[in-house]
Image (cartoon, rainbow, N blue to C red):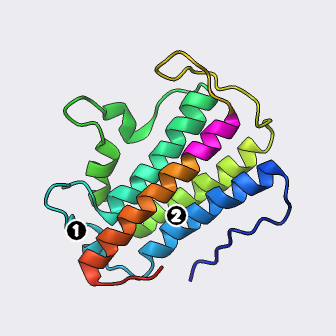
Amino acid sequence: MTQRTDTPPAWDERTQLITFLDYARDTARAKCEGVSAEDARKAPLPGSPLMTMCGLISHLRWVEHYWIQVMFLGEELAGPLTEASDDDPDPEMRTAVDIPLPRLLAEYQDQSDRYRHLLSGHDLDATAERAISDGRHVDLRWVLLHLIEETSRHNGHLDIVRELVDGRTGV
């Protein structure tokens, strides 16, 4: 069972932000524990054909890639996001049903560990290499807060999907 805590080991701002992001990440992983391979690929919401547990975990992984590697560090887009278009804005969710959930979870965990280490060398006030759509450059603090919000919001989606595919609730 995934161990998680939202209580930081220290009370400085960075530790609190990283603790809450890790808590949200761990919650996403916990919501996937014990789900069958078949259920992890099911899209139980008729109006949301990409809303699968596999798709949501893949989306979380690639959202972090986008905000940390592409926007904050200025690196090039990689993976399924390179295929995004107006007709297919979320290829990371569409293609995820072809990838086993344990692999998606392991890749998400490895990336989370790597980003935790990578970002430790940057000040919270450091600005992103790339500008957002309105031309401003967000700082690392904003990126971390955005990822906490994004991951927490999708944890709600994981709650709903999990209950609909196999009845499990309460994580």
Q: Residue at x 56, y 29 (%)?
A: 71
Circle 1 crowding by C-alpha within 10 Å: few under 14, some 14–19, many from 20 = many
**Mark 2 Cα shell of 10 Å, populated few (<14), some (14-19), many (≥20):** few
Residue drawn at (42%, 73%) of the image: 32
Q: Which residues are drawn in magenta?
A: 140-146
Q: Position of residue 165 (x, y in %)?
A: 25, 77
Question: Could you tell me residue 103's position as x and y percent?
Answer: 44, 64
Compare residues 159 and 90 and report the one nearer the observer.
159
Question: Of circles 1 and 2, which is in front?
Answer: 1
Give the residue displayed 62% in from the left and 65% down from the top.
23
Residue 116 horizontal side relative to residue 65, left or right: right
Question: Could you say whether the residue bearing mark 1 is in a helix, strand or loop?
Answer: loop
Find residue 33 and report its horizontal and vertical position in percent: 45, 79
Residue underneath mark 2:
106
Marking on residue 42? 1
Quarter residue 78 falls in = top left
Disc 1 from disc 2: Cα separation = 20 Å
**Horizontal arrangement in the rendering, residue 120 relative to residue 91 (left or right):** right
Q: Amino acid at mark 1?
A: Lys
**Residue 144 is one of the magenta-drawn residues:** yes
Residue 83, given in percent of the width and then of the height, sits at: 31, 33
Which quadrant would the N terminus be assigned to in this image? bottom right
Q: Amino acid at mark 2?
A: Ala
Residue at the (38%, 37%) spot, across then down: 81
